[in-house]
Amino acid sequence: MANEEVKNFIPRVKAEEEEEEEEEDLVDPATEIKEGCADSACFSLKGRLDDCNERVTSKNKTSETCFEEILDFYHCVDHCAASKIFQHVK
């Protein structure tokens, strides 16, 4: 009898199964804009960077890096994308 009183005293809560909502993967517009700039306005610098990477990776021992090419390429992409990215800021 005491057991029944305890069962009646303690409220029972049943969790309802929530329907799982399909979540869309959020895509950063800056990524798409920068990729577009890399393929259009900065195409020649991307080519120079790719050529440098191929040259460096083809050698076993080299002190050459593509640091200058990377900086030039990223500077171009950032400059191209800056105004377009800020149009998406709310």
Image (spheres, helix red, strand yellow):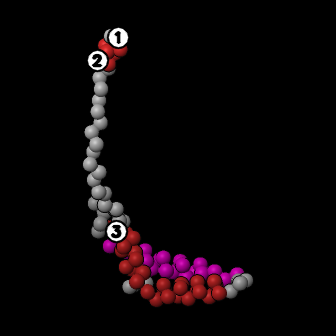
Residue 26 sits in quarter: bottom left
Label 1 close to label 3 by CB (< 8 Å) = no
Label 2 close to label 3 by CB (< 8 Å) = no
Quadrant in the picture for the N terminus: top left
Residue 12 sits in quarter: top left
- Residue 6 can be seen, yes or no: yes
Q: Residue 78 in the image: x percent, y percent?
A: 43, 74
As drawn, 20 above or below 42: above
Q: Main secondary structure of the magenta part?
A: helix
The residue carrying mark 3 is 29
Depth check, front residue: 4 or 80: 4
Q: Nearer the viewer, mark 2 or mark 3?
A: 2
Task: Specify the segment rendered in magenta.
Answer: 63-84
Name the element at disc 1: helix
The residue carrying mark 2 is 8
- Residue 80 can be seen, yes or no: no
N-terminal-most mark, 2 or 3: 2
The question of residue 72 being in magenta is answered with yes
**Amino acid type of the residue that numbered disc 1 sits on in the rendered structure:** Ala
Q: Disc 2 versus disc 3: distance between alpha carbons? A: 56 Å
Quadrant in the picture for the C terminus: bottom left
Q: Disc 1 versus disc 3: distance between alpha carbons? A: 63 Å
The residue carrying mark 1 is 2
Q: Residue 69 in the image: x percent, y percent?
A: 55, 82
As drawn, 16 above or below 32: above
N-terminal-most mark, 2 or 1: 1
